[in-house]
Image (cartoon, grey):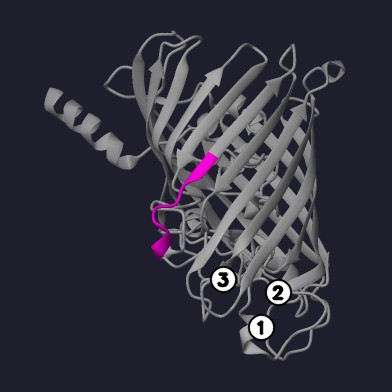
Amino acid sequence: MQMKKHLWVLMLPALASLSLADSAPEASAQDTKKMVQNNFVETAQKGIKLSGYVDAGYSYNFTGSGNNSMVSTRYATDTAQRGDFNLYAVKLALEKALTSENKAQAGFRTDVMIGEDASYFINRTPNAGYNTNNSSNSLFLEQAYVAIRAPVGNGWDFKVGKFVSTMGYEVMERPANMNTTYGILFNVMPLYYTGVLSSYRFDDYLDGKLGVVNGSNSDNNTTLNPNAGDGVALLASLNVTAPGGNANWSNNFQYSSGYDNNTSTGSTNSSLTSSSQPARANNGDISAYMLLYNSWGNWSPKFAEDKLLLAFNTVFGNLSGSAQSGAANINTHWYGAGAYAKYQFNDWFSLSSRGEYLGSNNDGVIGYVGASTTTNTAEANNPARHVTGVNLWEYTLTAGFNVIDNLLIRAEYRLDWGSNLYQVQTGAAQPEGQNGPAHYAGAEVVYSF
């Protein structure tokens, strides 16, 4: 019996691990964390906990022949044409967390996702039209890092390995977000990094992070130019918490010394989400740098007695450089903002809404072009093609039901629309209705443990 017990302990790390609390911004996941923070499986080794969830649902895109453009601005798992049953994710987290004591100590965390979302976190290709390749068998390693605390000042913490992005209000765990579907700003945020991230809490109101990593969504160096040597991305975050803890404001920065490449899909593929990768076709190697700034915050007014939560999310990014062949200059910038609101009517029912805007000067990130098409192949492959008035909007309304312990049920309606949008179709005219509107309805069932 003791032998079996030890074998079970050895097998657990192979399962990987998960907990909503660590990978999500504290504010965005606070309601879900209340539901799951005390739910875990205690392993045979003291202090190591296994937690997770199963997330499944049904989605329906009311897509006429002209709405394909707007549907594809959503995250790939949410773009299936017409009706689709989904296994979004089975998530497991295995963790030995650091204690609150300010002493030298170490721990670890490993997060694994299995399901349709995992398929697209591995090969992130939004803006690619309808999703016709659902795979619930995909395995995605979300995090795997060693945690270390140095007893310096108030305690200086480090993560070494692979960890989730410091950017954005929304996170990869759907149940931790206010809404079931991912927002359009989520599509242009990094997902994860590999490197070192340090964090320090100065006092009850101010904490910060500094990191050095390979780049966005990359397990190798961050540049697409093999002659430029190893690239690097620098991370910095500063979070301000209001007295009383009912509001906070997070500011996050990233500078990449090269054009971020996604090594999960190939050494010549960009980690950006565009459907027009600058490294494809005849553009050759890329010499560029990227700046990214994200600011998000939330506020739970005391007069509402913890029933109301208001939040915002913003992003500004800039990518500058050139392709070594094809005479392509790269000058892409993108910008966006979102507003969130959630009201908890009682213990079992809540209503959440989200409105977002995303714009860009060309198709380098959004993946669409503007006023007219071109029959020039070289120009069509130019990632720096200047386009004005490329805009996306979306509004989402989500009803949440906590009718049984550990069980969350949500129903959602979403509307997407835009201006001057169509997919890159050389020599083709813009199809009628490409600017939307595109309607979505869906339901989600989540069990957390």
According to the picture, the residue beneath numbered tag 1 turns out to be 379
Left or right of 217? Residue 423 is right
From the top left corner, tell me how far across and down residue 340 is, in percent: 78, 39
Q: Which amino acid, mark 1? A: Glu
The residues bearing labels 3 and 2 have C-alpha atoms spaced at a distance of 11 Å
| Residue bearing the label numbered 3 | 278
Give residue 304's quadrant in the image. top right
User: Residue 252 sits in which quadrant?
Assistant: top right
Residue 334 at x, y = what percent? 72, 56
**Residue bearing the label numbered 2:** 385
Instruction: Kindly tell me whether residue 150 is visible in this rendering.
Output: yes
Relative to 405, does residue 273 appear above or below in the rendering?
below
Q: Quadrant of the N terminus?
A: top left
Compare marks 1 and 2 and give the one earlier in the sequence: 1
- Residue at 82%, 64% (x, y): give it: 417
Marks 3 and 1, how far apart at CA: 12 Å
Q: Is residue 232 magenta?
A: yes
Q: How packed is label 1: few (under 14 Cα within 10 Å), some, or many (20 or more)?
A: some
Sort mark 2 into few (<14), some (14-19) or many (20+) by Cα contacts within 10 Å: some
Q: Say what amino acid the circle numbered 3 marks.
A: Pro
Task: Say if mark 3 contacts mark 2, CB within 8 Å.
Answer: no
Which region is colored magenta? 226-234
